Image: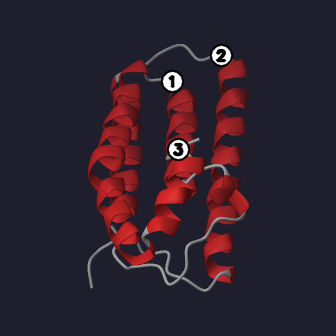
Amino acid sequence: MDIPIPPIIFIFSFLVSLILFFFTPIYKFESIYILSLIFIVIGIFLAVYSSYTIIINKTTINPNETPSILIKNGPFKISRNPIYLSMLIILFGLDFYFFAIISFINIIIFFLIINFFIIPKEEKNIEKKFGDTYIEYKRKVRRWI
């Protein structure tokens, strides 16, 4: 069984942000905390809602496995990758909370790895299984939002 890489990348990105926070002290504004909490809550909600949608549709959440059905409802109506989107939103919120400007580079690196290495591999696998149905879905629903 392959290790699901995206959660590992997410955790690594979070730890990098945390480390950078301790090495780049910056004055914090209270409004930044509120904004960061809004992003974190939205990201967590989206992650839970997306996971729930996958579970009730009785397919795999593991990106290394081929899903048994193509989910096009719930958050998958607006994003083909709502769990990755939720990870990105959470990281964005955490970096606002830490307010270490340099840690925003971390978000860019996370995005680039997921967008150009992880998602294309998954999409190739899904397209192989669902064919024209998935191609039509890709035309209607954007990769991120």
- Residue 23 lies in what quarter of the image? top left
Check residue 29 in the rendering and tell me which mark sits there, or answer none.
2
Q: CA distance from mark 3 to mark 2?
A: 30 Å
Q: How many labels were placed on the picture?
A: 3
> Which of 142 and 50 lies nearest the eye of the viewer?
142
- Residue 108 lies in what quarter of the image? top left
Q: Using a 10 Å C-alpha cutoff, classify the residue at mark 2 as few (fewer than 14 neighbours), some (14 to 19) or many (20 or more).
A: few
Of the numbered discs 1 and 2, the one sitting upstream in the chain is 2
Q: Amino acid at mark 3?
A: Trp
Q: Using a 10 Å C-alpha cutoff, classify the residue at mark 1 as few (fewer than 14 neighbours), some (14 to 19) or many (20 or more).
A: many
**Disc 1, disc 2: CB below 8 Å?**
yes
Q: Amino acid at mark 1?
A: Phe
> Which of 109 and 136 lies nearest the eye of the viewer?
136
* Residue at 67 percent of width and 55 percent of height: 77
Of the numbered discs 3 and 1, the one sitting upstream in the chain is 1
| Mark 3, residue position | 144
> Which of 93 and 64 lies nearest the eye of the viewer?
64
